[in-house]
Amino acid sequence: MEADHSSSATEGMQAAVFHGPDNILVQRTQYFQDRPALKVNSCAVCSYDVRVFRNGHRKVSPPIILGHEVCGQVTKSVQMTNGTISEGTRVALCPIIPCLDCVYCRTGQYNMCLNLKEIGSTHNGGFAEYVSIPKQTVKMGGLVEVPDSLSDEEASLLEPLACCLHGLQQLGPIHDARPVVIIGDGPVGLLHLQLFKNFVGTRTVVVGKVHSRMQKARSMGAEAVLEYNEDIATRVLDFTGKAGASVVVIATSNPSAFDLVEKVAGKSSKISLFAGMPSGQKFSFDANWLHYNQVSIVGTFSSLPPVLEEAARVAAERIVDLSEVVTHRYSLAEVEKAFHTTETFGGLRAVINKF
């Protein structure tokens, strides 16, 4: 756990503390009352949290509290650069903790920080009654007020929605009439679906494997929902009129997605590598295919405070309906059940909302 002997602490906070692979304990931990903090209202479970729980991670040093998709109420007024956030205000939390001094931070690219830390990985996160607010978060404007129209659990999904919006920004303008292909039917794939349908206005194909999630994609308005099997590339190309996709979003950590991308991307296509892959995973595309077809590959990671603000607007206006993505609710004591639901594809997003 984080130690700070210069702060007064009280033994009184319940937290799910990760002690190593397959070892998470709900226990009492120190809560530093003199720091700005959030009283956690809801913290969603990301697949990253589950992978860390099962296997550990190079940037996670136990004991630590996981969880980075947080909605909470500030316990003390916080002076931001653009005004004061009053005590008790509900906010969404940008989980990156930049150094604010490297070459990337000086140009506002905080997610590219050379010394990046993260809430829920290197700083205690949201699977707890409280999460302290790093000073860097305040300085970069990383607290965003939650619109009244959003529930706590919806607000905890503003962070992954912001990541998807950031991914769209990385792609640049999309003026192509050809369909977008999203590989992956999980929560992130379905957030992308809503954004491309309702924010960008493109026809969209979702390629999936889990029937309940594929049905959800249909109900959200995907023009085509196709099951991943041996003839998937042919069926996707048939839907595009043989022209291929304008954009392909890899929203799954399954490396088999790379095999499909080269078969369904069209000329001048943009490929978004959104999902993290297993450590050391490599992929290859034919160099001449990339060259002569003017295909672009874009990586995207996390988001930035202005994008989190945009996510709050998009969700409040129901351009993206976050309530469609929350399917399971658990207490902090049931955190392992929430992890199990996530890794077995039971529903979509699970949230911890009872502390």
Image (cartoon, rainbow, N blue to C red):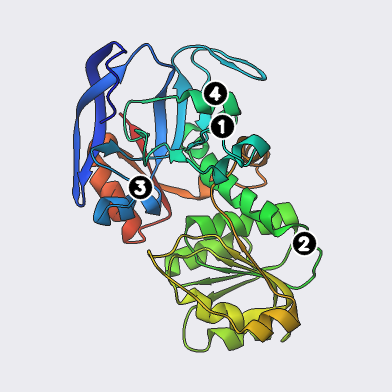
Q: Which residue is mark 1?
A: 100
Q: Which residue is mark 2?
A: 174
Q: Which residue is mark 3?
A: 59
Q: Is residue 309 left or right of residue 352?
A: right
Frontmost residue, 8 versus 260: 8
- Asked if residue 240 shows in the view, the reply is no
- In the image, residue 65 sits, relative to residue 194, either above or below, namely above
Q: Which residue is mark 4?
A: 138
Distance (Cα) linking label 2 and label 4: 34 Å
Q: Residues within 10 Å of mark 1 (few under 14, many from 20)?
A: many
Q: Amino acid at mark 4?
A: Val
Viewer-nearest of labels 1 and 3? 1
Residue at 71% in and 67% down: 203
Q: Amino acid at mark 2?
A: Ile
Q: Are marks 4 and 3 in contact (CB under 8 Å)?
A: no
Frontmost residue, 90 versus 9: 9
